[in-house]
Each structure stands twice: as C-alpha cells, then as structure tokens.
Image: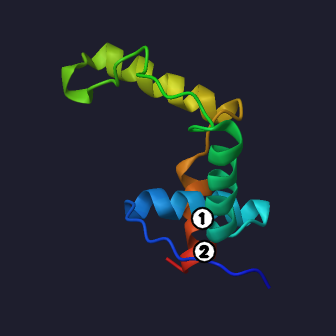
Amino acid sequence: MAKTSQIFARVEPETKAQAEIILNRMGISMSHAVGMFLNQVILQRGIPFAMRLPTEQPVAMASLTKEQFERELQKGIEDVEHGRGYSADVIEREMNLLYGV
C-alpha cells in the first residue's frame, strides 16, 4: 500500500453531510474525493473549477413582497418537478439512511 499523509480540514457540518450523501451514492469515500481534488489541482496547476462571484445576488426573503415570495417559491417547486433539485422529503430520506436521523 502506498504511503499516505493526513489532512485535517474544518468544514460546516451541513456541507460535509450533503457531500457525503452525494459521494456515497457515487461509491466514493471522502478521502478519495479529497485526493481526486488535489490531483486535479496538480494536473491543472490551480483550482480545477472556475471561481467567480455570482451574477445574481441571493434573494433576501425579508425584502420580498408576498407576490415576489410566492414567485420564488414557485420557481423552487418547478425546479424540483423538473429534476433540477431535491424535495425536502428526498433529503430527509437520504439523511435518515446515512445517519439514522
């Protein structure tokens, strides 16, 4: 077995949990995913994805009118219906499978 070195990183628990769900579904461990990322940094001689500021500002719910809020909510529902996101039920089911929550 090849010699390995440890890396310690602090991330938000929710970020880690969401990444683990996806990686588990792909059959990839967190360690392998980090190793893959680092190999890409080496191969590409930099961060292996574009890093830029978002073109749109996030929506602040408190600043929306009732009609604007309902439009944003409808956009989210349509995203889930068209496979561009996950419903709360799906996320909850995945969390239960992973953590028995």
Which residue is the extreme one toward the bottom?
Answer: 1
Q: Secondary structure at mark 2?
A: helix
Q: Could one spot residue 93 in this view of the protein? A: no
Q: CA distance from mark 2 to mark 1?
A: 9 Å
Q: In the displayed structure, would residue 47 be above or below residue 25?
A: above
Q: Position of residue 23 (x, y in %)?
A: 68, 61
Q: How many residues crowd around disc 2 within 10 Å: few (fewer than 14), some, or many (20 or more)?
A: few
Q: How many residues crowd around disc 1 within 10 Å: few (fewer than 14), some, or many (20 or more)?
A: some
Q: Which residue is mark 2?
A: 98
The residue lying at 57 percent from left, 37 percent from top is 46
The residue lying at 71 percent from left, 43 percent from top is 43
Q: Position of residue 73 (x, y in %)?
A: 44, 27
Q: Secondary structure at mark 1?
A: helix
The residue lying at 46 percent from left, 56 percent from top is 15
Q: Amino acid at mark 1?
A: Glu
Q: Earlier in the sequence, mark 2 or mark 1?
A: 1
In front of the other: label 2 or label 1?
1
Residue 11 lies in quadrant? bottom left
Q: Position of residue 78 (x, y in %)?
A: 60, 26
Q: Amino acid at mark 2?
A: Leu
Q: Which residue is mark 1?
A: 20
Q: Could one spot residue 63 in this view of the protein? A: yes
Confirm or deny contact between disc 2 and disc 1 (CB under 8 A): yes
The scheme the figure's colours follow is: rainbow
